[in-house]
Amino acid sequence: FKGVVLRQKVLRTIDWSPTYRCNANCVMCSARSLNNPNRKELTLDERKIVWKQARKLGVIHTQFTGGEPMVMGIDWLCQAIKDLNPRSTLISMTTNGLLLSKEKLDGLKEAGLDTIQVSLMSFDEEKHRRRMGIKKSNASSLLELMKYAQSIGLSVCTNMVFGKNNLNDLHERIKFAGENNF
């Protein structure tokens, strides 16, 4: 109403970075430089205050990002989602998927998450492992979890940062996304 009828500027999306901590060490990560152990993370109460103000400004979408939001713990994350009025807000989350499981996806869906965006650096296990800076690749389990997330009604998309070192993967990624409705 504010935007269409009254022609007022309206805030549409808020990105929440509940933490810049991460359990991966992705070579192309821009959030890594923001990780500061002395930086205090928002409490749920502080976030509620910001959210109340944002709703007054017209926010209809919020995205959990980071760092890795899942390092906050599944209980914290589910409570944070519930506090955001999931019936009237689109809620999404970007994750590297290292801490995901079917049970956690069920909990996130039940809490009100609409969309999960999974960082899949490569379909090749070794490339994925190297690009994420992890000891053991989780690329194949991520694909299974993404399909499971779709089966329980979550919208699923995949992301990766493209640069000179992985530009050849672009066509394969586009084909994959189309074939899997990601």
Image (cartoon, helix red, strand yellow):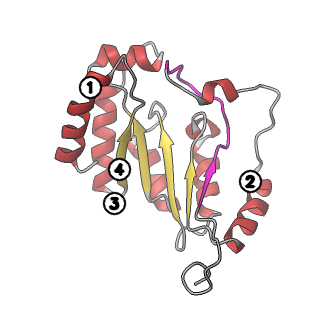
Disc 1 secondary structure class: helix
Of badges 4 and 1, nearer the viewer stands 1
Residue at mark 4 to residue at mark 3: CA–CA distance: 9 Å
Relative side of 94 to 180, left or right: right
Q: Amino acid at mark 4?
A: Val
Q: Is residue 123 visible?
A: no
Of badges 4 and 3, nearer the viewer stands 4
Q: Is residue 159 visible?
A: yes
Disc 2 secondary structure class: helix
Q: Nearer the viewer, residue 160 or 129?
A: 160
Identify the disc placed on residue 156: 4
Disc 3 secondary structure class: loop
Please give the range of residues in magenta: 13-27
Q: Tag 1 or tag 3, which sits nearer the N-term?
A: 3
Q: Amino acid at mark 3?
A: Gly
Q: Which residue lies under the disc numbered 2?
A: 44
Q: Quadrant of residue 20?
A: top right
